[in-house]
Image: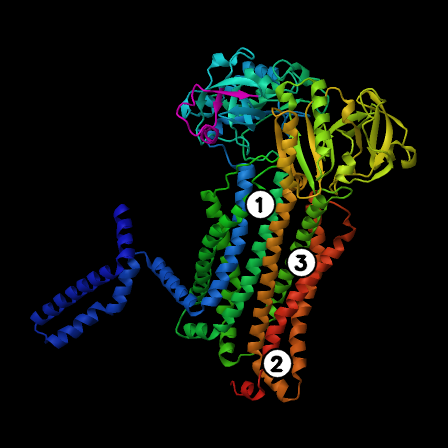
Amino acid sequence: MLSDLLFRLRALVRGRRLDEEMADELRFHLEREIEKLVRSGMSRDEATRQARLAFGGIDQTKDACRDARGISFVETLLQDVRYGVRAMRRSPASAMATIVTIALSSAAIATVASLGYTLLWRPLTVDRPNEVVAITAAHGRANDGIAAYPVSYPDYVSFRDRTTTLAALAAHYPFAPLFVTANGTAREVNGAVVSANYFSLLGIEPEQGRFFHADEDRVPDRDRVAVIGHDFWRTWLNASPTAIGSSLTVNGVPFTIIGIAPASVPMLTPVRVNIYIPTMMLRVGYRWCDALNDNTCNTLQMVGRLAPDRTLEDANTEFAAILPAKWKSAPIGQNRGVLVRRPRGMSEDDDEPRFVAILAGAAIVLWIVCCINLAGLLTAQSSARAPEFAIRVSLGAGRIRIIRQVVTESLLLATIGGIGGVLVSRGFIAVLARMFFSTDDEGHVLFYDFSPTTWIVVATVAAALAAGLIFSVIPALNAVNRANVTAATRTASGRWSTTRWLLGAQAAAAVAMIGTAALLYGSARMILAGRHYDTSHVALMRLRPRLLKYTPERAQRFQHDVIRRLAALPSVESASLVGVGAVLGGGTATLNTHMRVRYNEIGPAYFATLRAPLVAGREFDERDTLQSPRVAIVNETLASRLAPASQALGAAVTIDGTTYRVVGVVADVTPQARNHEPEPWAYTPFWQNAGEIDSRLAVRVSGDPATALPALAREVHAVDPDVPIAETITLPTQMEGLTRPIRVGAVFVGYAAALATMLTAVGLYGALASAVARRTKEIGIRLALGARRQQVVGAIVRDGVLLVTVGSMVGMLLARAASRAVVHLLYGSPAGDWMLFAAAALAVVTVGVVASLLPARRAAAVEPISALRQE
C-alpha cells in the first residue's frame, strides 16, 4: 500500500516526467514490434502500419495509462483550480467583491467565536486541565442553575477534610483590596489570599524563591509572608534580584517577600493578581467580617483536582452528601447546595451566554445575507458567461464537469475570503477589546486572552467554504441548463425576476438588524445619559479607612472632613457619600418584615449630586445624625406600594428591624430592563449608621470629571495621606462598564446591519444593471416608439424600490421579533420602537432608491439606433 501511495504521489508531483517515461516505453515496444515484423519479411512501412494497428491509438493508450494511476480526479481538480484562477484574472473586480464580502461576513463569525470561547469556554492553561474543577455554593437546590457563590473558611476546611474524590482542594480569594507600600510607592493593588496548596494544585513553579509552606498556613496571623506577581516585581521593584527577602507593607501590616510568581500564571479571573498572601492572613486581606472563624462570612472560592479514576459526576455526588449541616436548613438566598464543574472561560456574569448567543445570531444572519447576495451576483455572472458554457457543452463537456467548474471557482474565492476573514477578525477583536474589555466598572485593568485557536480558524474557513458551496448552487444549475445556454447565444433578452426574493430577503434582514442595533444603542444612551439622573460631570472615588483599622468614630470624622474640604473647592458643585455598593447600586433589605427592597445608605446632597428629582419631601442633610430621629427616603415605586404617593410622607417603615420615618419621595433612579418590574428602593442617612467605615464618594464638578480626579484625591490625602483611595473613575466610565453587553451588542449588530445594507445596495444595483444590459434592445425600441426617458427611469426605479419596500416591511416585523430576544438588554418604554423600525426601513428604502437610480440613468442614456443595431 505504501509503494502504491508513493507512486500516486510521484505521479501527482512529477506527472510530466512520468509521461516522458511512458512515451519512451511505448516507443520502445512499438519499435521492437516493428523490427520483429521487418525480420519476418515485411517492408518497414508495412511493418510500421501493422504495428500501429496492433497497438491501437497511442494517445488512447496514454490516457488509459494515466487513468490507471488513480489521480485523474486530482488532476481534473487542479485543472479546474487553474481555470478558476484565470477566471479571477479576467474579472478582478468581481472576484475582489466576492472575496471582500466573504471576508467581512466570516470575520463576524470568527469574532463571535473568539469572544464566546474566551468568555465561556477557554480552559485553564494548566497541566491536565480536565482534572481541575471549581467548587462553588448555590443559593437554592444543589446544582440548581449556574449562579455560583463563595464559601466561608470553616466550610472550606470541612469540604477539604472530608472529600475523597479530589486529590487536593485549594481556597482562594482573588479580589483582595491590598493597600501596598513598597520601594517608595504606595497605592491599592488587587491581591489574592490563597491556601498553601494553591500553586502546587495548579502545577505552577516559582520564577524565583518559593511558594508557601504548609506550616505557613496553619496559625492565624502568624506568618507574614507574601508571593509577588511578575508584573509587580518588574514595575514596583524594578525587577531587582534582591527582591526575595525584602519587605513590603500590606494594609498596614509588614510582609516578607518569599517568592515571585511566573509571568504565565493561570488566570481564574480577568483581574491580574499582584500579591498573594496565605489564607491564615485572611484578616489582613478581608476586613468586613471575621473571615477565619465566622461560618457566615462567605469570601473564598474553591478549586480542586480530581483524584485518579474519579469523575466530575463522582465529585458532584460526594459534595452533595458532605454539605455543612447549616446549609441543609438554610433559607433561600443563602448557601444551600454545591456546584462542581470545570472552570471554563473568564466570565462571571450569568447573562453572558445569552449575550454571546445574540452576537452569534447576528453573525449567522449576516452570513445568510452574504450567501444570498453572492448567489444573486454569481447568477448574473453565469448568465453573462452563457456563451462560454454553450461552447464547452458543444465540445462535449458534461453537466457534472461544468457544475464542478463553477463550484470549484466559488470554493476558491471562499477559501481566500475565509482566510481573509480570520485576519480581519483579529482587527475587530483588538478594537472590541480596547473599547469594552480593557477595564471593568471599578476601573480595574482587565486581561482577556482573545487569541484565536485552531478550531476557530478551521470553523471560520469552513463557514466560508459552506457559503461558497451554497451560493454556487444556483449559478451551477443555470450553467448546465442547455436551453438557457442556447437561448443566451441567440438573444440577450431576459428578466431578473428569479433574484427578486433574494434581494427582498436581504432588505428584510438589513431592516431587522438596523432596528435591533438602534434599540440597543438607544438603551445604552438612555442609561449613560440617565433617566431621572445625570451622570455627566460626576467623579467617583472609593475610600477604604477600614484597611488601616479605623474605628467607626474615627472613620466618620475623617469622612466629614473630606466632604467639607471637597465642598470648599471652587470647581465642586456638590459631594456626597454612599455606603453600600456602587453609587447607583446598593444591597437589599427587608421592609416591614415581609417585603424585600433595594437599599442604600447615602449622605446629604446625594440626589442633588445625581440631579435626581425629589417628588415630595426633602433630602437628607447635616441634621440627620446619630442623635436625631431615624429617617428614610423611598422611591416612587416603593411609595406607591406603601400608600398613595401623597400620603407616603411621614409613614413609618421598618428596615431590617429598625423603624424609620419617611421624609422624602424621589423619582425612580436606577435603570430597569424591560423584562423586570420597577424595583422598590429605600434610602437611609449615611451619618445615622455608626458602623459604616468605608464609603464611596460622588462629586459633581463644573468641568471634566476625569481631569478633576487628581485634585480631588489630593484633598482627600490632605486629611489623611495613608487612607487608600481606589476606583478613581468617572460615573460615565462606570456606567459604560456596567452596560458593556448592550454596547458591544449595539456595535456588533450595527456592523452587521451596515454590511447587510451595503450588500443589499450592491445586489440591487447588480441585478438592475444586469437587467438593463439584457433589455437594451427593448429599451431602445421603447424610446424609438416615443417613450420618454423619464418614463424609462421611473419604470426601472419602481422595480427596485417596490422590491426593497416589500422586504423592508417584512424586516420591521422581524425587528419586532428580534427585540423580544434582546429584551433583557433594553431599557425604557417600548412605545417608540416602531418609530425606530420605520426609520430603519426608510434608511434601507433610501439606499434602494440610490442603488436603482444609477442603472436607471444608464438605461435612459441608451441611443435607440445603437440599441437596435446590437443584433
Q: Residue at x 73, y 59 (%)?
A: 838
Quick check: 675 above or below 339? below
Q: Position of residue 385 (x, y in %)?
A: 47, 72
Q: Residue at x 55, y 51 (%)?
A: 108
Q: Which residues are magenta?
A: 226-250
Q: How far separated are the C-alphas under marks 1 and 2? A: 48 Å
Amino acid bearing label 2 = Ala
Checking the image for residue 435, the label placed there is: 1
Residue 622 occupies quadrant: top right
Q: Nearer the viewer, residue 122 or 192?
A: 192
* Residue beneath disc 3: 511
Amino acid bearing label 3 = Val
Residue 151 in sight: no
* Residue beneath disc 2: 860
Q: What element does badge 2 sit on?
A: helix
Q: Residue at x 65, y 23 (%)?
A: 545
Q: Are marks 1 and 2 in contact (CB under 8 Å)?
A: no
Q: Nearer the viewer, residue 359 or 685?
A: 685
